[in-house]
């Protein structure tokens, strides 16, 4: 396939500071065409994550359609939300210069599931940046649609290291382990898992993302990632550097440069107990 024709991608996300960077990189990559954004609970509530996705579409001036997805996990109780901060986009909301509180972009009518069932084509790859609840529901309700996709690239899980949410769990899977278990049992589509172990090995320095665009975009990124970077500056286990483990950005990195990754076939079992 020519590497100059933009390839379609759908981003399923719970923005999220690292999600925000991933969404920005995907939109600025000339070889990707973002067909749509579907949101899911996770870093924040579905309402806040959907509003954040709309704010990011405003910021990028991209016009990308946003569809609201699952507000809670398939089986487990009420979702837990992690808070890097109250909105999960750092100080972005207080910037004032970039947007009012309410984003201009509104989520589209119709939910994420219906959009995914209709929009996926043979060349579509889906970047899964949050709990995989939407994709598990799609596998259960519209298996033939999901089977059309070229691949799912999923940020999730942890194998040979402690988790980032419990000693055993990475956040996205911790939010909805049953969803990933069901999705991995769906054999109709290729799934590439990028676990926390790998994300921790590919950290980003501030210089990697503070200059991705014009002044307004760079300033917004600074507002979004500020608190996150401050956290890592103080986290001596990572060497207190000025950057961060920007988990979700590695999914976009794989979509752009798969040759940089060594992908191994694995049989993966998800622990869904307590
Ligand atoms: O464990 C990292 C994952 O949890 C990332 O997707 C981050 O955005 C959080 O959702
Ligand atoms: Ca995420």
Image (cartoon, rainbow, N blue to C red):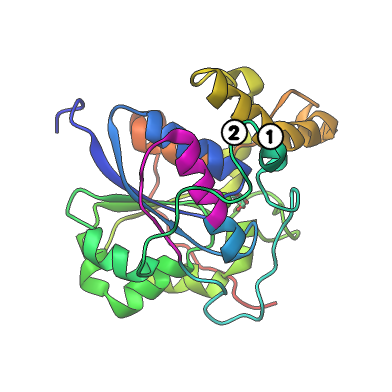
Residue 240 is a magenta residue: no
Q: Position of residue 207 (x, y in %)?
A: 61, 17
- The quarter of the picture where residue 188 lies is bottom left
What's the magenta region?
51-68
The quadrant of the picture occupied by the C terminus is bottom right
Q: Residue at x 30, y 56 (%)?
A: 190
Secondary structure at badge 2 equals loop
Relative side of 124 to 234, left or right:
left
Residue 52 is a magenta residue: yes
Secondary structure at badge 1 equals loop
- The quarter of the picture where residue 109 lies is bottom left
Q: Residue at x 74, y 54 (%)?
A: 83
Query: Closer to the camera, 203 or 130?
Result: 130
Mark linked to residue 39:
none
Report if residue 14 is visible in the image.
Answer: no
Q: Residue at x 80, y 28 (%)?
A: 233
Q: Determine whether label 1 and label 2 are within 8 Å by CB.
A: yes
Q: Which residue is mark 2?
A: 98
Residue 89 versus residue 32 in the image, above or below: below
The quadrant of the picture occupied by the N terminus is top left
- The quarter of the picture where residue 136 lies is bottom left
Query: Closer to the camera, 185 or 251?
Result: 251
Mark linked to residue 95:
1
Query: Closer to the camera, 76 or 23?
Result: 23
Relative side of 5 to 226, left or right:
left
């Amino acid at each position: 396939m020519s590497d100059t024709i933009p390839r379609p991608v759908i981003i399923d996300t719970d923005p999220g500071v690292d999600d925000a960077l991933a969404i920005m990189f995907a939109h600025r990559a000339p070889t990707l065409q973002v067909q749509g954004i579907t949101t899911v609970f996770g870093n924040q509530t579905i309402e806040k994550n959907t509003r954040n996705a709309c704010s990011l579409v405003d910021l990028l001036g991209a016009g990308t359609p946003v569809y609201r997805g699952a507000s809670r996990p398939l089986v487990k109780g009420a979702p837990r939300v992690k808070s890097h901060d109250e909105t999960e986009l750092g100080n972005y909301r207080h910037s004032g210069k970039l947007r009012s509180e309410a984003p201009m972009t509104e989520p589209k009518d119709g939910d994420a599931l219906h959009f995914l069932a209709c929009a996926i084509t043979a060349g579509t790859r889906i970047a899964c940046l949050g709990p995989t609840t939407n994709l598990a529901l799609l596998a259960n309700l519209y298996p033939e649609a999901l089977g059309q996709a070229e691949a799912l690239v999923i940020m999730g899980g942890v194998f040979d290291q402690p988790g980032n949410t419990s000693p055993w769990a990475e956040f996205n899977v911790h939010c909805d382990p049953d969803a990933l278990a069901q999705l991995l049992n769906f054999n109709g589509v290729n799934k590439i898992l990028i676990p926390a172990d790998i994300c921790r090995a590919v950290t980003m320095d501030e210089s990697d993302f503070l200059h991705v665009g014009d002044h307004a975009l760079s300033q917004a990124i600074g507002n979004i990632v500020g608190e996150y970077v401050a956290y890592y500056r103080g986290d001596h286990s990572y060497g207190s550097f000025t950057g961060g483990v920007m988990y979700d950005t590695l999914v976009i990195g794989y979509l752009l440069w798969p040759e940089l990754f060594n992908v191994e076939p694995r049989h993966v079992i998800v622990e869904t107990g307590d």
